[in-house]
């Protein structure tokens, strides 16, 4: 069998022209496509395109096309295009084009959106809980009395950020009493919450950076 000619722009001519079984050499645009290879990617030129019809309609048309040449002229149109637009059309026709969904991104995106909702609900659970400020810790100190030495706890900061109990200016220390005192226990829990949230913040900053890269 003699090797069939090929479209100079890589098209499946039968698919483009909506003519079942047409050879590239018989395509109305065969010579035009060859000449178009010498144009720039965005230079416009004209092509003939037949108005689409189903395979059944095409078969019927082929049976009586010779007896109705006028119908041939009425079922084709002239389009202006460029090599760049045709290259896209060719790849969309033959290149097994993919979508966001077929590559699995849509399902992953939906999973991320669900996780952000869960994370928002998780953040809401902190609303009525104490969260310690950055750079403050609970320290243990001892007080000597004539009858013994006692251990106490205090919440300390590097700056005067705490509201005072009996002064007119902010202070660096809040006394929390003994180990079993609720003030001490809740302050320590607040430090743990703060540490956990700051770690979460660091991870979210990295996530945000990666998402911004996805938009580049």
Image (spheres, rainbow, N blue to C red):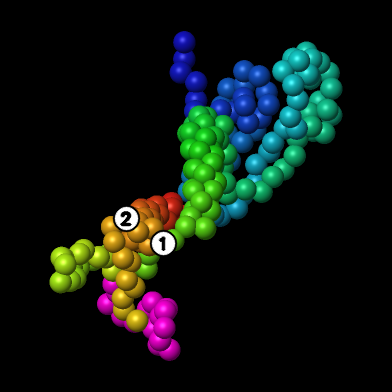
| Pick the front one: 101 or 117 | 117
| Percent position of residue 201, x then y | 38, 58
Query: What element does badge 1 sit on?
Result: loop
Residue 132 image-quadrant placement? bottom left
Give the numbered dot on residue 211.
none
Q: Which residue is mark 1?
A: 131
Which residue is drawn at the image coordinates 31% and 65% (left, top)? 177
In magenta segment, residue 166? yes
Q: Is residue 83 left or right of residue 60?
A: left
Could you tell which of marks 1 and 2 lies nearer the N-terminus? 1
Which residue is drawn at the image coordinates 62% and 48% (left, top)? 81
Give the numbered dot on residue 180.
2
| Percent position of residue 153, x then y | 27, 65
The answer to whether any part of residue 39 appears in the image is no
| Pick the front one: 184 or 181 | 181
Quarter that holds the C terminus:
bottom left
């Amino acid at each position: 069998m003699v090797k069939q000619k090929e479209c100079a722009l890589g098209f499946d001519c039968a698919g483009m022209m909506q003519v079942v079984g047409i050879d590239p050499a018989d395509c109305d645009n065969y010579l035009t496509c060859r000449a178009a290879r010498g144009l720039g990617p965005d230079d416009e030129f004209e092509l003939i395109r037949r108005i689409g019809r189903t395979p059944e309609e095409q078969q019927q048309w082929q049976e009586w096309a010779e007896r109705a040449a006028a119908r041939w002229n009425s079922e084709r149109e002239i389009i202006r295009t460029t090599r760049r637009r045709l290259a896209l059309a060719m790849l969309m026709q033959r290149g097994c084009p993919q979508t966001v969904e077929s590559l699995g991104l849509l399902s992953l995106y939906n999973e991320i959106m669900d996780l952000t909702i869960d994370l928002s609900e998780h953040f809401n659970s902190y609303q009525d809980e104490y969260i310690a400020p950055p750079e403050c810790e609970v320290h243990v100190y001892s007080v000597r009395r004539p009858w013994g030495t006692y251990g106490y706890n205090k919440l300390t900061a590097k700056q005067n950020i705490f509201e005072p109990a009996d002064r007119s200016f902010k202070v660096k220390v809040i006394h929390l009493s003994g180990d079993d005192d609720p003030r001490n226990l809740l302050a320590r829990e607040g430090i743990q919450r703060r540490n956990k949230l700051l770690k979460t913040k660091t991870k979210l900053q990295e996530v945000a950076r990666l998402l911004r890269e996805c938009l580049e």
